[in-house]
Amino acid sequence: MQNYKIIDISCPSCGGDVQTDMKHCKYCGNAITITTFADVMHFNPLYSSKYLSNYENALKENPDDYQVNVSAGICHLKLSNYELAQKYFEQAILDNPYHTDTYFYAAVCKLQGKKAFLTPKKRVDEAIQLINTALSIEERGIAYFFSAYLKYDFYNRKALNIRPFYDVDLENAITYGVTEEDKRFLFDLLKVQQPSALN
């Protein structure tokens, strides 16, 4: 069950006194907690680090706060600190095991900015398991597409067997409404080029 505790923190942007249940700072209007990677797409490394420092300070007193762990994980992911991001996402999953995005981001961390083809099998399998867990909570097109990519780039390209095949996940991705924007977002997040076979 999600931890609904509201904690006092400083605004990551202006330093004003705010709480984690507020979406935007009442002083500067900027986001207080980061909920999706889209929130940090425009952040430069300095700004990401500023937000991250704020979250890590808040977690010293409230280490099991779900939303702040997710926010810290996303900032580390933006900075390509995959191991640290993974740690925060794993804690967030312990705090709230029913949020699909957390599993999705944790799966992204497993690849560490590399193609699935170049990633050790153990990490690819862990990423697939995380995506499967996310899909068991909520079936989403982008998650099926991510699964299709993992199975295609690692298993299919290496002529290894896995069931269901990547093409089943591709069909499910279409059924559940994956968009071209979703695909671009996924591969921007992974920092790799989309294989032409998945176009």
Image: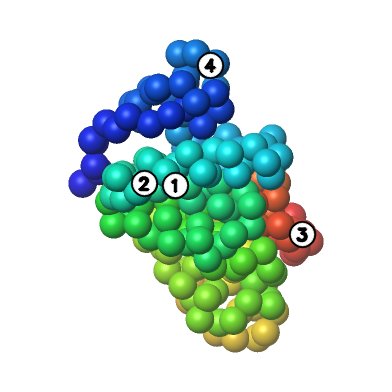
Viewer-side label of 3, 1: 1
Q: Which mark is residue 193?
A: 3
Q: Is residue 91 visible?
A: yes
Looking at numbered disc 1 in the image, what kind of residue is underneath it? Glu
Q: Which residue is mark 1?
A: 56
* Kind of residue indicated by mark 3: Gln
* Relative vertical location of residue 90 with respect to residue 35 in this rendering, above or below: below
- Label 2 close to label 1 by CB (< 8 Å): yes
Graded by Cα atoms within 10 Å as few (under 14), some (14 to 19) or many (20 or more), the crowding at tag 3 reads: few
Residue 24 in the image: x percent, y percent?
47, 21
Q: Amino acid at mark 4?
A: Gly
Q: What is the CA distance from the residue labelled 4 to the residue labelled 3? A: 35 Å
Distance, label 2 to label 4, CA atoms, is 23 Å
**On the image, which quarter does residue 170 sit in?**
bottom right
Real-space Cα separation, disc 3 to disc 1, in angstroms: 32 Å
| Residues at discs 4 and 3 in contact (Cβ within 8 Å) | no
Please name the residue shown 55% across and 46% down the image.
Answer: 75
Q: How far is mark 3 from mark 2, CA to CA?
A: 35 Å
Q: Earlier in the sequence, mark 1 or mark 4?
A: 4
Q: Which callout, 4 or 3, points to the residue nearer the camera?
A: 4
Choose mark 1 or mark 4, whichever is in front: 1
Mark before the other along the chain sequence, 2 or 4? 4
What residue do we see at 42% from left, 55% from top? 89
Secondary structure beneath disc 4? loop
SS at badge 3:
loop
Camera sees residue 168:
no
- 117 lies left or right of 172: right
69 to the left or right of 185? left
Labels 3, 2: front one: 2
According to the image, label 2 marks what residue? 59
